[in-house]
């Protein structure tokens, strides 16, 4: 049994050109956002937002609307609820635990009612390597550029507020406003990531690379750079491997991301 077939790679690469571009953009955004997810202890919240993003995308697919737009609406709704009601970690986790099954149930209902191609249903959960067409790429690029522009503006105060909110507030940093801004950016990043890696495995892009980076570096400059590099290797490598195997992208992205994390844990242990 042949697991990978790269004999026609020169003909297959153009088919996923949009996915490679989208993956590179999402790796940059996911790596940067992920560093704040780790410092703000919001890994579980990412999964909750992804479930509502999946529900929004599934409802949009059922109604024949723009899937990316539906995904954005679902993500922003979840981010708003978590941000407004989950100020403390315990409250946030309980809210996420409520949102996850609700979003997943609504999404599954919408997919059950959808009578179109089965690949569209499966792709929302696990991702598709050839699912990014030109309109979707435009949406994804616009979202990523917007997130990157806002991050450039708020990076220093957001980093300060994420590391020590009380001290930052005492120094006059608008911590509440920054929290709202970050939740919006996180919601948009999740919505964009769902289109490539799927709702069930979005953590492999927005959490695992950053979790690996903080194991080998505490530098405020090197850590986000490593996180972006790890996300880039995971996404681009996953797309290229999935292309040769003819399987969904998610297993490859998650496997590469997990292996990078394991290596970083080993490096951390050896250095200690």
Image: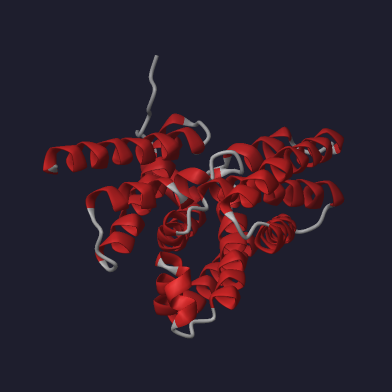
Question: Which corner quadrant of the image does residue 9 belong to?
Answer: top left
**Residue in front for this viewpoint, 170 or 104:** 170
Location of residue 16 in the rendering, given as x and y in whole percent from the top left corner: 49, 49
Q: Does any portion of residue 82 appear in the rendered image? A: yes
**Residue in front for this viewpoint, 182 or 162:** 162
Location of residue 244 in the rendering, given as x and y in whole percent from the top left corner: 41, 34
Whether residue 258 sits left or right of residue 120 in the image: it is left
Whether residue 143 sits left or right of residue 166 in the image: it is right
Question: Which corner quadrant of the image does residue 245 belong to?
Answer: top left
- The quarter of the rendered structure image containing the C terminus is top left
The residue under the point 73% across, 56% down is 74
Q: Does any portion of residue 50 appear in the rendered image? A: no
Whether residue 97 sits left or right of residue 58 in the image: it is left
Instruction: Give the residue at the far top of this rendering.
Output: 1
Instruction: Give the residue at the far left of this rendering.
Output: 271
Location of residue 196 in the rendering, given as x and y in whole percent from the top left corner: 55, 49
The residue under the point 70% across, 56% down is 78
The residue under the point 27% across, 68% down is 221
**Residue in front for this viewpoint, 195 or 108:** 108
Q: Is residue 192 above or below residue 167?
A: above
Q: Is residue 130 above or below residue 180?
A: above
- The quarter of the rendered structure image containing the N terminus is top left
Q: Is residue 178 above or below residue 195?
A: below
The residue under the point 55% across, 53% down is 193
């Amino acid at each position: 049994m042949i697991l990978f077939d790269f004999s026609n790679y020169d003909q297959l690469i153009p088919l996923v050109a949009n996915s490679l571009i989208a993956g590179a953009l999402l790796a940059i955004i996911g790596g940067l956002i992920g560093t704040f997810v780790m410092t703000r202890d919001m890994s579980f919240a990412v999964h909750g937002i992804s479930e509502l993003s999946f529900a929004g995308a599934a409802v949009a697919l059922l109604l024949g609307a723009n899937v990316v737009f539906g995904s954005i609406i679902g993500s922003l709704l979840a981010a708003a609820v978590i941000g407004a009601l989950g100020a403390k970690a315990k409250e946030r986790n309980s809210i996420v635990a409520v949102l996850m099954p609700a979003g997943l149930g609504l999404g599954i209902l919408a997919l059950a009612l959808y009578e179109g191609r089965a690949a569209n249903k499966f792709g929302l959960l696990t991702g598709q390597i050839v699912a990014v067409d030109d309109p979707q790429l435009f949406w994804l690029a616009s979202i990523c550029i917007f997130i990157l522009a806002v991050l450039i503006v708020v990076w220093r105060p957001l980093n300060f507020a994420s590391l020590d909110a009380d001290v930052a507030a005492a120094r006059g940093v608008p911590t509440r406003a920054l929290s709202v801004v970050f939740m919006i950016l996180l919601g948009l990043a999740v919505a964009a990531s769902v289109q490539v890696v799927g709702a069930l495995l979005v953590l492999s892009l927005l959490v695992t690379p950053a979790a690996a980076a903080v194991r080998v570096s505490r530098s405020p400059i090197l850590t986000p750079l490593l996180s972006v590099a790890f996300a880039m290797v995971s996404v681009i490598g996953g797309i290229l491997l999935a292309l040769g195997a003819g399987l969904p992208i998610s297993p490859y992205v998650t496997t590469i991301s997990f292996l990078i994390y394991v290596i970083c844990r080993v490096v951390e242990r050896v250095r200690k």
